[in-house]
Amino acid sequence: MQNEETFTQVTFHYQSGETESFDIPVTPEALQLQLQGLLNQPWLTLHLFDSTVIIRTAKVVKIQVKPPLPEIQGDGIFTDAQRVTPLTHGAKL
């Protein structure tokens, strides 16, 4: 049986405003290595224990990954970014 550390939580945010989250049985490092290739696919297929989910990548506007993937670096990558929420908006750090 795989332990919790070998799973990566991925949340897909769709153009429609809906979101779906999945625990994918790969390490964050393995997902990071596959990420660009996965995003270039027109469809992603996730086999769940009770169903299969097929996602059209053209309808995905954002993907959130937990734990973070700090190994991704380069142009357009901002490290140490912080999410602004209603509670933190305008607060001084």
Image (cartoon, rainbow, N blue to C red):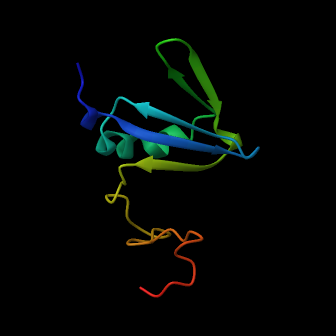
Q: Position of residue 74 (x, y in %)?
A: 41, 67
Compare residues 86 and 27 and report the one nearer the observer. 86
Above or below 53: residue 4: below
Residue at left offset 62%, top offset 24%: 54
Q: Quadrant of residue 8?
A: top left
Q: Quadrant of residue 78?
A: bottom left
Q: Residue furthest right?
A: 16
Residue at left offset 23%, top offset 29%: 3
Q: Position of residue 25 (x, y in %)?
A: 35, 29
Q: Residue furthest bottom?
A: 92
Above or below 83: residue 89: below
Q: Quadrant of residue 9?
A: top left
The quadrant of the rendering that contains the N terminus is top left
Is 50 placed left or right of 57 in the picture?
Answer: left
Is 23 placed left or right of 40 in the picture?
Answer: left
Q: Position of residue 30 (x, y in %)?
A: 31, 39
Residue at left offset 49%, top offset 18%: 48
Q: Residue furthest front?
A: 87
Is 51 placed left or right of 92 in the picture?
Answer: right
Residue at left offset 64%, top offset 34%: 42
The quadrant of the rendering that contains the C terminus is bottom left
Compare residues 93 and 71 and report the one nearer the observer. 93
Above or below 88: residue 24: above
